Amino acid sequence: MSVIDLLINLIEVFIYPGVIFVVFISLLLEWVDRKVYARAQNRIGPYYVGPHGILQPFADILKLLAKEDITPGHVERLEYLLSPMLILYLSLVGIFMIPTGAWGSGYSVIHFEGDYLLVLTLATLTTVFMFLTGWGSFNRFGAIGSLRALLLIAGYEIPLFICAAAVILEAKTLCLSKISAIQGGGIWFLVTQPIGFLVSLISIQAELERIPFDIPEAETEIVAGWLTEFTGRKLALMRLANDVKLFLFSSLVVTLYLGGPWFMGQANIAIFLVKVLVVVILTSIIRALFARFRIDQALSVFWKYVIPLSLIQVIMSLFIG
Amino acid sequence: MCSEYIEIPVGPQHPALKEPIRFVFKIDGELVVGVEPRLGYAHRGIEKLAESKNYVQNTYLFERVCGICSAAHTTCYVEAVERLLGVEVPPRGLFLRSIIHELNRIHSHLLWLGILAHEIGFDTLFMYTWRDRELVLDLIELMTGNRVLYAYNLIGGVRYDIDAHIESQMRKVLSYLRERTEYYKKIVEEDKLIRARTVDVGVLKRSDAIILGAVGPTARGSGVDMDIRRDDPYSAYEELSFNVVVYKEEDAHAKTMVRIDEILESINMIEDALNKMPSGPVYVKTPLKVPEGEVISRVEAPRGELLYYIKSNGTERPERVKVRTPTLANIPAVCKMLTQAYIADIPVIVASIDPCIACMDRITFVDVRKEKVYVISGRELREYARKWYKGVKK
Amino acid sequence: MSLSMVKELFRTLTRKPVTRKYPYERREIPERFRGRIVIDYDKCIGCGLCARFCPAIAIKMVFVETEKGKKRKPLVQIFRCIFCGQCSLVCPRKAISYSKEFELATYNKEELVLEPKSSEKG
C-alpha cells in the first residue's frame, strides 16, 4: 500500500478519530458527567479551571501525572504494573471499532464481521485486568475490591450479550458499522427494542462501576477497592481509562440503539457526539438518583429482573426480524 | 473454608469513619465473625484540664467536647453547677435553653441523615439534607452569634434574649423544615434501595439493648422506651408537650425513622416553647465559689443519655468532673450488631448508632497484663521514658 | 426508587445551585457575631477580670505608662482566642467588644497580638 495510505492510517489511529481525539473527548465527557451530577445535587461542580470548569479533568490528569509514583514492596510486579496500561490500551482499541462518522464515512477505523463481539470481549478483559491488578497489589482492600469486580461480571455480562444477540438478530449482521448504517436507512433500534435499550443502560452502569453498582470501588467500605494502591502516573492512567470506557460504552449504546452517526441519510461526527452526550447525561442522572447496592443485592437484581427482561427482548426480536 | 480468618482493620483512618476509632474485624468471606474495638484516639485530657480552670471557664471547655452536640454538653454541665449552687434560673432562660437544645438536636439529626446517605452511596440525599441543615445553622447564628460552639448557656441562664424579628424568622424556617423533613421521611420509608440497605441490617434485639446498656435512638429503635426529657425532666421540658418516638423493628431502618421523627418532634417542641414563652429576665448572677458537694446531671443529647458528675470542694475550681457520653454506652451494642453482619454493612451499622468519637474518648486504661491498677505521676512517667530511650542516638 | 425523588431531582437540575462562590461572594454577618476582639482602652480600669475568666488564657495584664502613672491593661494574644465572649460579659465597664472580622489567618504571629499602647489619657 502506498505511503499516502499509510499516512492516512496513522492519522486515523493516532489523531482523528484516534487516540488524541478520543482522550480529548473522554475528558470533556467527564466534565459533563461531573457537572450534571453536581447540578442534580444543587452544587456547582467544576467551575474555576477554564470557562465553567471545562478544563478541570485535564488539570486533574496533569496533576496526577506529576505526583510521586510509589510501588509498594511486596506487589506482584507483573500484574500490578502492566494492568493499568493494558486496561487503557484495550479500551482504546475498542473505540477503533465504533463508527464515529469521522471523515464523513459511516465506517469505523477497523471494521469486519464480528467486531461487535470483539468489543464486548475487550470490555470483559478490562474487568479481568482490574481483578488482576487489585489482587496483585498485596492489599486487603484491593483483594476485596477485585473479588467484587469479578463477582459483578456474573451479573452484567449475560444481559449485555443477550441484548447483543437481540440486536444482531434484528440487524442480521455482526458488524457495528453495518448495524448503525441499517438504522441510518430505517428506524432506530431504540423504537423496536426499547427493553434492550433499558437493559443495556443498566448493564453499562455496572460495567463502568458507577452508582448504583460501584461496589468494587465503594469508598466508604473498602477505602478505594482495587484502586487502593495506585498513586501518581498509574492512577492517572486508571482515571483516563475510566473516562475512555465511559466514551466507549456510551458510543456503543449510541451505535446499537440510536443510529450511530447517521441522521437523515448523512453520517456526521457532530451528530454522533450529540447522541453520546445525551447518553452520558442519562447515566449521570441515574448516578445521582440511586444509592449503592450491596454485592448480593446487585446480583439478585440482575438475575431476577434484568436477565429475564433481556430474554424477553430476544424472543421479541425473533418475531420482529 | 480455612480455619484462619482474615482480619480487616477499619480505622483509625478510614473513609467510612468521621473520627478515629479502630475496629479489627475477623472475616470469613463477606461475613464478620468477630469484632475488636480499640478506643482512645481522640482522648484529649479534658477532664484533667477542667480541674485547673474555674467553673466559668469550664463552661467553654465542655462545649468543645463535641462540636455537634455542644448545646447538650453545656446544658448538662451548667445544670449540674446550678444544682450545686442552689440557684433558680428564671423561666424564660430555661425556655431559651430548651429551644437551643432542640435546634441542636435538629441540626445533629439532619447531619446524621446525610452521613447515613453518604455511607450507602446516596450522595444526592447527603447534599440535600446538608443544604437544609444550613438553614438551621443560620438560625442559630442569628440567635447566638455563631454557627457551631455557641457559648450561649451560662451558669445562671443564657446569654442573649430573642426579639420578635428572631422569633418570626424562626417560625418561617421551622415550617419550611417541617415540609422538607416530611419529604425525607417519605423517601426513607419508600425508597427501595435505602430499604434494601437498612432493613434487617444491624439488628439489635430489645433484650440485648437493655442488657448492653444502649441509650438514645439506638435503644429507642429497638423498642426500649426511655427518654430523659420525659423520665427526668430538666430545663423547661416539664412544661412542653411532646411524644417519645419508639420503633419496634430493631434494625437500622428503625433507628433512621426514630431520628427523622425526632426532628419533627423537635420542630413541634420549639414552636410550643415559642408559644408558651414566659417573659422576664434570662440570666441571674451566681457566685463564683461553689459550695462543697457532689452532683449528677443527665440530659438527652442527640445521641442518647449524657451524664455529668461534678465533685466540688468549696473553691472556684471543680475537684473532679466526669463525663459519660452516649456513644460510649452504645459501643458494646454496636459490637454485638457487627458480629454476623456482612462487610458491606459495616459502615451502615456503625453509622446507625451515630458515633461521636470525640465525645467518647474519656476512659482510663487499666493494665490488665500486670494485674494491678496504679497511678503514675507525670514526673515518674518522664523518668521512665528517659530511661527507656537512654542510649538511643538522636 | 421513589417517584418523589425523581421529581425533586429534575427540579434541582433546573434551579440555581446553592453554592456560595466564596471568596468572590461573601454573606452578611449577623449582629451578634464575635469576630476579632476590640478593646476600648480609655474605658478600661485595669481590674483584670477578663484575664481571670478567659478560658483559653489569651489575656495577660501588663503595665503601661500613662499620664497618671503606670496602669494595668490587658494584652490579648488573639491567636489563642476562642471567640467565646466571656471577657466582654464580665467586663464591668463594657470596654470589650467584637468586630465582624474573622479572616484572621496570617503568616506573621505579631499581627495577632492586641497590645495596649501608652495612651495620653488614663
Image: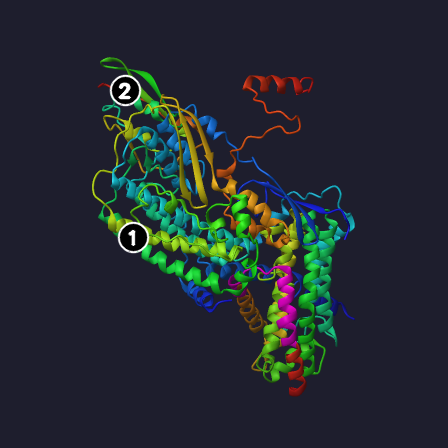
Which residue is label 1 attached to? B271
Q: Residue at x 60, y 54 (%)?
A: B345
Chief secondary structure of the magenta portion: helix
Q: In front: C117, or C86? A: C86
Say if A235 sits above or below A119 in the image.
above
Q: Chain of mark 2?
A: C
Q: Is residue B317 magenta?
A: no
Residue A42 x/y as whole percent: 44, 58
Residues in magenta, as a range: A285-310
Q: How many neighbours does mark 2 have within 10 angstroms: few (below 14), some (14-19), or many (20 or more)?
A: some
The secondary element bearing badge 2 is classed as loop
Q: Is residue B258 above or below residue A176?
A: above
Mark 1: which amino acid?
Glu
Residue holding disc 2: C47
Which residue corresponds to the image point at 28% horizontal and 41% vertical from the top-left?
C31
Residue at left 57%, top 61%?
A211
- Res. B367 image quadrant: top right
Callout 2 amino acid: Cys
Task: Give the foreground label among 1 and 2.
Answer: 1
Q: Estimate the x, y position of residue A46 in percent, counting from the top left.
A: 49, 54
* Image quadrant assignment for residue B365: top right
